[in-house]
């Protein structure tokens, strides 16, 4: 699995700004790139709109849900009949 994640460096620790699908104590390889300037962002967006560049995997204009939205969604999913989503995902992944 490869994904692009934005993080903040605080007190000697990189803190991702969105949840990550990692196991506790899992070792990962990092490539640290500074956030591009506004001008670079405009050029990248123009290249994407022109079809000359594809956004990286995991890139979305939709902001991640807030903690409250995640809790509400979890409550809604818990009330749905049938198997819990976690079991369905595990079955789809296979052994």
Image (spheres, rainbow, N blue to C red):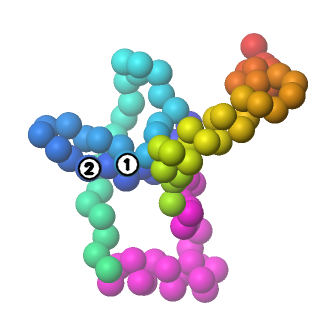
The answer to whether residue 89 shows anywhere in this view is no
Q: Which region shows up in magenta? A: 39-62
Question: Mark 1 — residue?
Answer: 17
Q: Position of residue 52 (x, y in %)?
A: 59, 79
Graded by Cα atoms within 10 Å as few (under 14), some (14 to 19) or many (20 or more), the crowding at tag 2 reads few
Secondary structure under tag 1 reads loop
Choose between 42 and 17: the one closer to the eye.
17
Q: Position of residue 74 (x, y in %)?
A: 64, 35
Graded by Cα atoms within 10 Å as few (under 14), some (14 to 19) or many (20 or more), the crowding at tag 1 reads few
Q: Quadrant of residue 16?
A: top left
Q: Position of residue 82 (x, y in %)?
A: 87, 25
Q: Residue at x 37, y 18 (%)?
A: 25
Tell me which label, 1 or 2, sits earlier in the chain: 2
User: Is-magenta flag for residue 60?
Assistant: yes
Can you say whether 90 is above or below 66 in the image?
A: above
Q: Quadrant of residue 76?
A: top right
Choose between 50 and 67: the one closer to the eye.
67
């Amino acid at each position: 699995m490869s994904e692009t994640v934005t993080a903040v460096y605080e007190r000697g620790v990189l803190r991702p700004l969105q949840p990550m699908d990692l196991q506790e104590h899992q070792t990962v390889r990092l490539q640290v790139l500074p956030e591009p300037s506004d001008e670079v962002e405009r050029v990248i967006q123009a290249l994407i709109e022109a079809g000359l560049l594809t956004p990286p995997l995991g890139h979305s204009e939709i902001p991640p849900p807030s903690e409250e939205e995640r809790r509400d969604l979890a409550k809604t999913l818990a009330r749905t009949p049938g198997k819990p989503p976690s079991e369905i995902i595990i079955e789809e992944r296979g052994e």
